[in-house]
Amino acid sequence: MAYDVCDLVDRSVAAETVIKYKYIVKIQMEAGHITEIFSSFQGEGPYAGKRQIFIRFAGCHFSCFYCDTSSARDPKPRFCNLLLLNKETYSKRNPLSTNAVIDCVKDLLTPDLHSISYTGGEPLTSHSFVKEIATEAKVVMHLKNFIETNGYSATAFASLADSKCFDFASIDIKLMSHRAVEEKDYENLYSNAMDCVKISADRGIETIVKIVVIRNTAVDEIEKLCDDLAGFNSRLKFVLQPVNVNITTQPHLHRAGIVPDIEELFKLSEIAGRILPDVMVLPQVHKFMRIP
């Protein structure tokens, strides 16, 4: 629901109203398309193993050749799939309202919950909807919010960062070799992603920068990226994530041999470590655990 955290004095939320400074204010509920909502363990980066409720927003502008959630590219799926704690699965018709999403979150709360993960697809394509859900989760439910984004729009990201509702941001910066966009559009993509990192760091959000590494990743590209990041915030975490290939669903990638070997990972990690203070190499842990 669209209210400012700093303005909210009496947190009363009912019948699509909020009480603000003793006045009843009518508000417009957001609604959006979501692919799935479920509880699991974070599988990437420094918070791997932390329990999260994942809200996977529909739609993504990119076409990364290694994508493992291609089904989430559809911007308007007919249904949202919900996986309950008892392992039952059911579907809700899209679009979902903010209240409907929050109700799903409430059903998935557990004592070990670390945060709510806003992932995709790409959550920035639904930034107003994301902000409304995150505000409710933060202000009313006192939960932590964790956004996972490719950073394609610094403007959209800034609107979320300025809400002061996000505690963590994992920004997946695409390399030219990922073929996320056409070559002519790459400079704009890179510029927006780097602006997102700066905005996140400047707003005091715990910032994680992730790079998916494929075989023969250009050394000079990693070096330039690290140089660009070095001026932002020494607290950011830099993750080199070796690409994961599913032999069953991505046999063409398996045959292409795109997974980097250990020597290449050593080399890239050492290059990054000469420039940035907090560097790690981590695969997608959830793939090994065979969980969502």
Image (tube, helix red, strand yellow):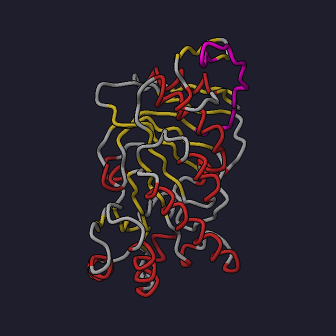
Q: Nearer the viewer, residue 123 or 79?
A: 123
Q: Position of residue 156 (x, y in %)?
A: 63, 52
* Residue 29 shown in magenta: yes
Q: Residue at x 44, y 60 (%)?
A: 246
Q: On screen, 228 above or below 51?
A: below
Q: Quadrant of residue 7?
A: top right
Query: What secondary structure characterizes most of the magenta part?
Result: strand
Viewport quadrant of the C terminus: top left
Q: Position of residue 174 (x, y in %)?
A: 53, 69
Q: Quadrant of residue 84?
A: top left
Q: Write the start and end of the magenta stretch as one range.
A: 18-35
Q: Residue at x 41, y 44 (%)?
A: 167
Viewport quadrant of the N terminus: top right
- Asked if residue 83 lies left or right of residue 52, the reply is right
- Asked if residue 285 lies left or right of residue 124, the reply is left
* Residue 21 shown in magenta: yes
Q: Residue at x 55, y 14 (%)?
A: 12
Q: Residue at x 67, y 37 (%)?
A: 33
Query: Which residue sits furthest bottom?
Result: 220
Q: On screen, 277 above or below 160?
A: below
- Asked if residue 216 lies left or right of residue 265, the reply is right
Q: Nearer the viewer, residue 111 or 237?
A: 237
Q: On screen, 13 above or below 108?
A: above
